[in-house]
Amino acid sequence: MFPLRLLPALLVLGGLCLLTSCSLRMQTAERAKPGVTLPPSRPVSQDPTTTARKRPVPPPVYRFSHLDTLMVGERLVRLYPGSRDTYERLPVQQWLINEAAGEGDELDPEAEERRRLRKAGITAQRSGRTLALRCQNGKAVRLVNNPTENYDTSVLYEYVATLPRIHHWLIAVRLYEGGYYLLVDQQTGRQTVVWSPPSISPDGQHFVCGSSDVLARYEPSGLQVWSMHSGHPELLWERQTEWGVSQPRWLDGHTILFEQDFIHNGDVDTRVMRMTLPD
């Protein structure tokens, strides 16, 4: 028997124990509020701190290191990814713009040439198959079309533009398969074969010709760099590459941006690249 004087203390102690046990039971039995669905508990194996993270895959522009260099003589020239926004804002020389027919329309090359010749005036005229260019020294350059089914002899000459910055006419030469371009000196009639329409530097002292035919390979793919310091085109260097150069544009007097075409997963992919030309 407990003494009666201890009974009040025992009653208080028992009440405290009862309240504590009830409080603990209520904490472990969590209940959702009405209308609220609790998310399922995450298994330990799916905890992000315990699972290995997948390594990020870099975008393609950073993966093709074999397309990022070019050997010029004994000098290694590096190419860097260029900004598409910057490239699109650079001025485009008129003869580099592809004026192909719109979707669903058929391009008429003869009509296009007549339109261009009207701008050239009397210095460039066509009569039948003959394209006549009148030089400043009095010489006349005549380029005669020979449209045949013969692979070796078929040729068509098409007037493209007059290039006042370098004082040349630009002529497209269409062969049975593929082709090239001619620069004809307006003073002397001297002819220079180039891969593509030239992109001329802001000071007119250089131009580059980019060519891209990575699928058919009828024409060379790569880059030519020319100088006009002597008054006529002089080839500084050219490189045929496994990738193509399309629409080169000058960022400044030494740097170009261009679209680089390359084969990826059996198809042609394109990215904008930046290149500082070596002296």
Image (tube, rainbow, N blue to C red):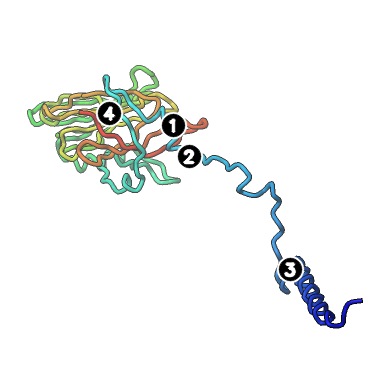
In the figure, residue 142 lies in which quadrant?
top left
Residue 156 visible from this viewpoint: no
Determine whether label 1 and label 4 are within 8 Å by CB. Answer: no
Q: Nearer the viewer, residue 187 or 34?
A: 34
The circle on residue 50 is: none
Mark 2 → mark 4, Cα distance in angstroms: 39 Å
* Residue at the spot of label 1: 64
Residue that carries the numbered disc 2 in the rendered image = 58
Q: Is residue 217 above or below residue 94?
A: above
Q: Which residue is mark 3?
A: 27
Residue 111 location in percent, x, y?
A: 31, 40
Camera-nearest residue between 271 and 156: 271
N-term mark: 2 or 4:
2
Q: Amino acid at mark 4?
A: Tyr
Q: Which residue is mark 4?
A: 181
Q: CA distance from mark 1 to mark 3?
A: 59 Å
Viewer-side label of 1, 2: 2
Give the crowd class for mark 2: few <14, some 14-19, many >=20 residues within 10 Å.
few
Secondary structure beneath dot 3 equals: helix
Sequence order check: which comes first, mark 1 or mark 4?
A: 1
User: Which quadrant is the N terminus positioned in?
Assistant: bottom right
| Disc nearer the start of the sequence (3/4) | 3
